[in-house]
Amino acid sequence: MHIAAHDVGRLSRLTAGCAGVTVAVLGVPHMSGTGPAGALLPAGLALLLQVTPAGGRAERLRAGAAALLALAAAGMGAASLGTHPAAAVATTLAGLALACLDLRVPSRTGGIAFRVADPLLLGAAIIALVALVPRLFEPAFPPGRGPDSVMPLHLAGTLLALAVGTILARPETGPLHTLDESGPRVAVRRLAPALIAAPIVAALVSAFAARTGASRPVAAVSTGVVLAALALLALLAYLVRTLDDADQRQRHLVAELRERQDFAQTLLQSMNEAVMVLDANYRVIDVNRRWRELTGHDEPPASAPPLPPPGTGGDWLLPRADGTGVPVLATMAAIPDAAGATRGYVATYIDIAERKQAEDALTEHAAELERGNADLAAALAFKNDLTSMLTHDVAQPISSIASLAELLCTDWADLPDDIRLELATKIDKNTRRLIKMMNDLQLLFRLDTGAVTARRVPVPLLEVVEAACGTAVGAGDVEIVIDEDLAALADRGHLTVVVENLVKNALTHGAPPIRIRADRAAGDSVCLAVQDSGPGIPEDMLPKLFGRFLRGAGLGLFIVRHLVEANGGTVSYEHAQPRGARLIVTLEGAPA
């Protein structure tokens, strides 16, 4: 039949309370005395208070009153050391044990705490047993010659009851309690009754032998001593065997624990992921081999590197010993104890450098595809614009040349000479127009491929402008205001093409008079402005004014922009006052 632990504890406290009442009652007749017997009453009351349940403030009052009564009993016992030394020592030890019943000293090895009252109670119980055992041998002595004792029988029995009751007052922390189901403490707990009963049984055997005449009193005493010695030897042998078994179990447990630690360490070091183990205060406890390889550290760092919040994970940058960082996939997990509180953390890092490189390569490839798509779109737009221009601008002079040539061939004999000359002149004009357009297209292709380079030299602006205007149709309405010593640093051929296209644009889309003016600007630059008196350029056409294929404007302004930029200059547009358009070319000035 098994008894529950709380029932055993309740029975133990009840027994201790009864022992306290008994000691107090036996001490009442001696309460007026000052010897050890007079200390029994406060000692019994102190024991009774120690087992009385209380809570809150009443608990503190109960503990204080029990301590005061126990100290009073110890003081009364110590006061009679001169007259009753054995009883005084036992009473003093019992009183001190009651006073410090709940006082414990922590173990240095981290085991069960040592209770201060245990050796005091052991001393008091031994003194009481020493006083009681000779009395048990009294029947073995002749009449009138009983054994001597260190204290009266009733006092020794009362002190033994006080010691046993004090031991039972705290069954959860007393000397007979253990937290383990193996070891010498369990053996002591189980064999303590046999240890106490051995001398009593020996005394009874000796007394029976003396009364029956089976042996002399000396032989009876010897028999009791031999029995007690045999019982003690048996107990010692059992204890030695128990200690040996406990030592073997301890060695086995230590070996198993070491094996598990080695297995856990091997498992940690063999993981392909980098692992860092930290305590609850984020101090690094251990790292594995992969972590050392990934970070370049030979030893765990003194302080943990930046960590993601516990319970989260994601892309992270793990710092290396050389100051660089490794892209990793980091996770942070808490390690709970048995109560659920966090006792540490485990940080895991997975190297994703190759994945990052692949992602970067894919991103770069996607960007290249985007750029290729943009180039294809630009090429497609260029093809469409070129096709539109060829259909509109190139087809017109070709059609005119074809129709005029057909007319000449068909009606040559019937046409007068002046008509023939006029038709031939128109064919020549359209042919020159077509040749100019082909030259512009050829220059356009060269500009698109970046094959146009400028050889810049000092170029007199007045000379270039006059030469360009001399070849332009309708240039008689052009007014030129340029100093003879004004020069720009540019490619002469490029500058001639620029002026020709600006003058042609002003004559075609503007209205006379045309004014060409050049002046020195801020710094060392030179500004060349071509202004007409036409209606100007509409606002919706300004963003694409210098584009490649502006509807109705041909390639002139696009070629102008690229040639000016190839010579390190800029071209811009502004409205003229009161009306008209002004195109301004800015170039680096040359010394006069």
Image: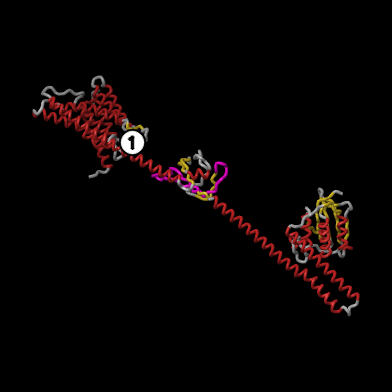
Q: Is residue 204 visible?
A: yes
Side (left or right) of 209 relative to 155: left
- Find out whether residue 337 is within the magenta segment: yes
> Over which residues does the magenta segment extend?
320-349
Q: Hey, which residue is sitting farthest right in the picture?
A: 417
Residue 580 at x, y percent in the picture: 82, 61
Residue 164 at x, y percent in the picture: 24, 33
Q: Hey, which residue is sitting farthest left in the picture?
A: 213
> Who is closer to the viewer here, 396 or 59?
396
Please tell me which residue is depicted at 14% across the width and 23% down the height of the picture. 146
Quick one: quadrant of the N terminus? top left
Please tell me which residue is depicted at 37% across the width and 34% down the height of the picture. 109
Q: Is residue 28 visible?
A: no
The residue singled out by tag 1 in the image is 59
Position of 407 relative to 320 (above/below): below
Residue 382 at x, y percent in the picture: 71, 64
Side (left or right) of 374 relative to 267: right
As shown in the figure, which amino acid type bears the numbered disc 1? Answer: Glu
> Who is closer to the viewer here, 526 or 297?
297
Please tell me which residue is depicted at 13% across the width and 27% down the height of the picture. 220
